[in-house]
Image (tube, grey):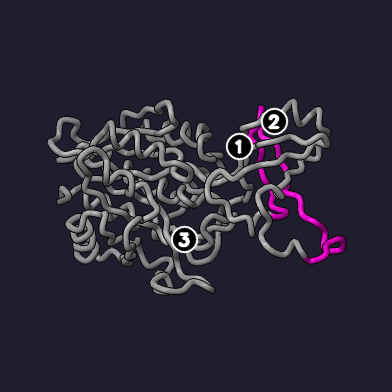
Amino acid sequence: MKNTRELLFRLCRLCGVSGNENSVAKFCAEYLAKYSDVKIDSNNNVIATLGNKNARKTLLLDAHIDQIGFIVTEITDDGFIKVDKCGGVDLRTALDAPVIVHGKEDISGVICCMPPHLSDGKEEKAPEIDKIIIDLGLPQERVKELVSIGDTISFYAEPKELLQNRVTAAALDNRAGVAALLKICEYISDKELNYKVIILLSCQEETFATGAKTKAFSVYPDECISVDVSFAAQPGVSGQYTNIALGKGPMLCISPNLNKPMFNKLKEICEKSDINFQIEVCNGRTGTNADHIAVTKSGVKTAVVSIPERNMHTQAEIVDISDILDTARLIFDYIICGGV
């Protein structure tokens, strides 16, 4: 478990805002090269091929490597940076947050926040995006030397270990899923398989799902399991997610656009192998890459396995390491048994 935590922390420290996944893609490709043929395509997808490359069936395992953040839209005359959202940023958590601007070099900054002494109370609600202004503490001339329109910006939050195998960090959505797939590569690298297994660490899920759309089309697998995070119980959460707990195993998704036999097989494996699992019901879209992969060409059998997470799309996301390991173990067993 310690090794998995260290791997996850390394992943979360790397920038991967949608469209600028270069550093995390490079790290993942180097990691996977120990176990498989691997390449990075023109969009920053990382693709690794394992198993029997001449097998009749191809299984695609997908997890997105990108994270939410901002994109630079303007540098003001006084050296501040204005931005737009790059993915589903929760602006309630943005004020006074530390950030890293990925310009010609990585530069630390903070999102401006009105001191309470000077506030009239109107800033208590989440600000509009045009009110988000970043201060690098530099004069305008230096800012313009280092930063260009279109550069990406990520939240900074040093990963931390909590009690009971839990960790907190920014970008656990979806570096937790990436970590699970990297562990699966370790498990299957020396196994003889009936599958050709393609690992897709996909780009731009938080914006346009470019990675999943393009690679699923070119690979056109027989089956796909998309690994992401989903909602765990916490104060204020209602409905079905009040029953989803950290540390109680991966979430198996039921949805009209997912393959029911694959769900049944994953559930059966959990029950036979004594793997804890939880069930998530979606009434249509799952909000994951599976929505796009399932409708590739004439259709792909697709399932979703999610890692429970608290505080999604914030700088303080929380997951349980045991859920990542159980996700890896479940999918490994699915591969070994030959799927559906």
**Tag shown at residue 147:** 2
In x, y percent, where is residue 93? Answer: 64, 58
Q: Position of residue 309 (x, y in %)?
A: 46, 61
The quadrant in which residue 85 appears is top right
> 310 or 256, which is in the foreground?
256
* Magenta highlight on residue 42: no
Which residue is disc 1 drawn over? Answer: 152
Q: Quadrant of residue 153?
A: top right
Question: Is the residue marked by circle 1 packed among few (<14), some (14-19), or many (20+) residues within 10 Å?
Answer: many
User: On the rendered image, what quadrant is the N terminus found in?
Assistant: bottom left
Percent coordinates x, y for residue 311 in the rendering: 53, 61
Q: Secondary structure at mark 3?
A: strand
| Helix, strand or loop status at disc 2 | loop
Mark 1–mark 2 Cα distance, whole angstroms, equals 10 Å
Residue name at image x 73 percent, y 39 percent? 81
Q: Is residue 155 left or right of residue 19?
A: right
Query: Would you say 306 lies left or right of 198 here?
Result: right
Magenta segment boundaries in residue numbering: 95-121
Position of residue 102 measured from the top left corner of the image (x, y, whole percent): 63, 34
197 left or right, relative to 316: left
CB atoms of marks 1 and 3 within 8 Å? no
Label disc, if present, on residue 279 of the rendered structure: none
Which residue corresponds to the image point at 66% horizontal and 31% vertical from the top-left?
Answer: 149
Q: Secondary structure at mark 1?
A: strand
